[in-house]
Amino acid sequence: MAAIWWSMLGSRGVLPAAFSITTGVLVAAIQRHGAIAVPLGIAGAVFILLQVLAPLQTSLSANLGDRTAAFLYDELTRACVEVPGIGHLEDPELAADLQTARDFDRGISGPPLSLSLDFIATGLVDLIAGFAQAAVLFGFAPWAPPVLAGSWLATHWLLRESGVWRDRNTDEVKHAQRDADYAYRLAVDPPAAKEIRVFGLSDWVLDRFIARRRRLHQLQYLATRMRERSVLASLLVVLAANGLVFWALSNAALHHHLGIGPLLVYSQAAVGTALIAFGGLNWALDGAAAPVAAVARLKAAMAGTRTVASGDRPATGMPAVGITFKNVTFAYPAAPGRPVLGGLTLDIPAGSSLAIVGQNGAGKTTLAKLLCRLYDPTSGVIEADGTDITTLDLDSWRSQVTAVFQDFVRFELSLRENVAPRGAPEDVVRGALGEAGAAGLAELDTVLSKGYSGGTDLSGGQWQRIALARALTAVRLGAGLVLLDEPTAQLDVRGEAEIFERVLAATRDRTTILISHRFSTVRQADRIAVVEDGVVAELGSHDELMELGGRYHTMFSLQAQRFATGTPEEGEEEVVFDVLG
Amino acid sequence: MSSASGTFEDTAIDELPPALRSMWRLCRLGFEYEPALMGVAFVLTLVAAVPDALLALWFKLLGEGLLEHRPTLLYVAAAGLGASAVATWFLQTVSTRLQRRFRDKVTIALESHVARLQASVTTIAHQERPEYLDRLSVLRDQVFTLDHMYMSVFSTAGWIVRLAVTITLLATVSPVLILLTVFALPTVAVTSWRPVVEREAQEQGGQADRLARHLFLLSTTASSGKEIRVLGTGRDLAARRRSAWEQWYGPLAAARTRSSAWYAAGWAIFAAAYVGAIVLVSAGPHASAASAILVLAAGARLSSYVGATVGEIGFLRGIWMDGSRRLAWLEDYAARAAREADQPAPSRITEGIRFSGVTFR
């Protein structure tokens, strides 16, 4: 498709010159009263091509633009999913680029590629057409093309300062841009809508926006305004060159060096050379090239963050004995100086359940990420049945693990695919749905989003049951390690306790790790680990820890007091206190 | 004033206001904000159209000057050609700059206007309900559609001036040549029909497009990235994204290709008429090379002017006008909200607040 696009571009570029020549020949034939059928036929054919190629290329540009965008989206998707860890997706340095690249073809910061390519084609066609017409003038005089084409080309150079805003990356510009955008978003986007009205902030937000926007415009105007001298110089240059060429043409014609045919050919070519000033690499190219560069940059950067590598040992049947954290230290790549885990040691016997509690940022979710090998420890080892999990084949290990995170995935796919994304027999799917308390929510083939034919929307609580059913399906298919990272935060306390009871029953012979803030749920686990400052501060059963009278006892008592006054129903808003905070 | 039966939000979302009226309202708004710049930019756009359209006349005079051995006419025509080429460039450059200046300034005013409208409506349904969000998404994220409308209107006026001059020139050779415009009508018809067909194809693939976007976001977002890796479905999602995109793209690409073939066929009809016009002036008993030159030059320009006019109107109708309709709707919505809440708020609550038979959905 790209080859056809370029061929069309070239053809459209030379056709105006061909048309100038054929019309000159035709007029000469008319003047001679000679046969006009052949020149008329050729001129007609060239004219038809001139007319039909443009719309055909517009359509081709739209398709090519869409395909290019799809290619870039594919590249970006692959770059994101093929890295086995998720460090590249959580890297704050890549986040801004990734956000821009994600939206590049949404028409937010410029036209989508399906439109841009046609703008680009138009600029290039004009440029080629201008040079092709200038080339025709070689037939008249060798000096004419450089003079005329050179003068039109000079306008690009003389007006270069006003064409591009070169200093747009200064702190002042960036600041004004960011501030204006922020104020605009405050005014028009939903999140701030309520408070802006309640506190009467709309005028304040708007004044702020207008002030920043005006400043931004002022900076842009000063940088790109037309300089009178440049405009005048351009005007003089092109006037002189055109005057010279047209004077020479008239002179040659008057002195019988040019007949009507050649005079018309060269005159048309001389006028057509002006297209050089209009054509070129226009603004659309800048916008269209930016995502290509961003995706290439991201691909290289993401490949460079490949910190998780697969081993080669099979993980079938693991964990049969247990999971062991041995002096595990971990810091996120973006903050290497602030370790989240600082020498954590923990044994989790296979077939038991362990609840992890701790204040926000204590490293609870990090433990789950390390077990899933989304990251590897900075130092120390995590072993499954005595084998370092980094030596295990990654796919094999992950097939033994199932996890439900707080921000679990809501696939806009059928219920069946939500519960078993990699496929499972129907009885397994239905069984898992039943265990998660989600039987009868929808038909298995119903799409779980109203944006699709026959689709349906689920409440937050219902979605959580679907996510649990997904984990239970994996358990039924052989996963031995179940990680539940606050998967039921949108259920009320009773609902969560009930669900966890079901999950524990369904995963009785598996190793289950639960992260939760709710002690009514946590207490059901065989053992509870209190994580503080990156290490296990307390470990034991509910009764043991209560007897110990330490941090767990304090936390549990505080929460129990609160709930003694009554608990909210499912669906009602509930404040969950982080009692460790 | 509030009605007893409920608020202005109770009814289903209204239809968008009519296109032409909305466009006129937006033009008036632009004039209100930047009268001088808008006026000068518009006039300059029209003036910039003239030298280009006069090229055909200069070519004809050039031919006459040579064939009738009139050196002065030949020099004047040659100077006219050079001057037209330079003036076209110069006026367009200056006019584009003025337009940009106008656009930049009016954009600030329009963005403020849109932000003020959205922020000043006392309720937040338009910022929370999906149907309102969909309607206003263009104004939230693509305010440029509003200021581009002015440029589009200016350009269309410029092309119409060129068309008028060119048709007049053709009529000086033979009034029959005005009929050339009739042969351009198929392209006009196809231009009106194309966006409809392509938009239908696009809308039919809406679900597939939505799914492709959803899968793309899942694949490239950290929050979903965790579970996708554990599930081991990353590559599958990438493949499904592509397949969903193909489902959207296939029919759309076919519709585009079909409609562009029809469009090209329309142009082929015009081209045939153009050839016929040349035969008419070059093969008849009163055949003249100068007339043939004018028809060749003006006819060729006529086609590009018709194409540009029709294309610009297509953009105007398809994209830019849509923004003005949404703005007009928002203005009406905000005005209605203000009308229905015109009682002064009490300086202090003395008796309390009572909910009386309140329903909400």
Image (cartoon, coloured by chain):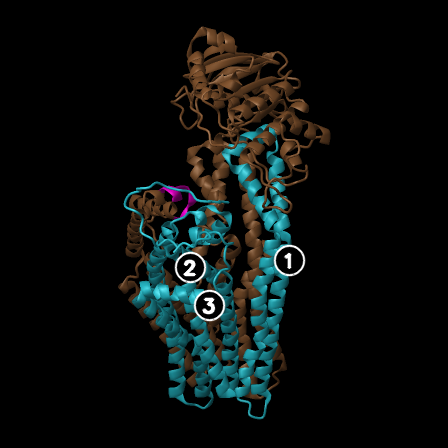
Which chain is the one coloured brown? A
- Magenta stretch mostly in which secondary structure? helix
Which mark identifies residue B332?
2
Comes first in the chain, label 3 or label 1: 3
Comes first in the chain, label 3 or label 2: 3
Q: Is residue A140 visible?
A: no
What type is the residue that disc 2 sits on? Asp
Give the Cα distance between marks 3 and 2. Answer: 16 Å
Q: Which residues are magenta?
A: A188-195
Tell me which chain the residue with mark 1 is part of.
B
Q: Which residue is mark 1?
A: B254
Q: CB atoms at circles 3 and 2 under 8 Å apart?
A: no
Q: Point out residue A478 in the picture as x, y percentages from the top left corner.
A: 67, 22
**Residue at the image position 51 percent from the left and 72 percent from the top:** B304
What type is the residue that disc 3 sits on? Leu
Mark 3 secondary-structure assignment = helix
Give the Cα distance between marks 1 and 2. Answer: 39 Å
Give the Cα distance between marks 3 and 1. Answer: 31 Å
Task: Inspect the magenta stretch and tell me whether residue B120 lies in it.
Answer: no
Above or below B166: residue A430? above
Q: Point out residue A265 in the picture as x, y percentages from the top left corner.
A: 49, 77
Q: Point out residue A65 in the picture as x, y percentages from the top left corner.
A: 54, 53
Q: Is residue A134 visible?
A: yes
Q: Point out residue A428 in the picture as x, y percentages from the top left corner.
A: 70, 28
Mark toward the viewer: 3 or 2: 2
Q: Which residue is mark 3?
A: B20
Q: Are marks 3 and 2 on the same chain?
A: yes
Which chain is the one coloured cyan? B
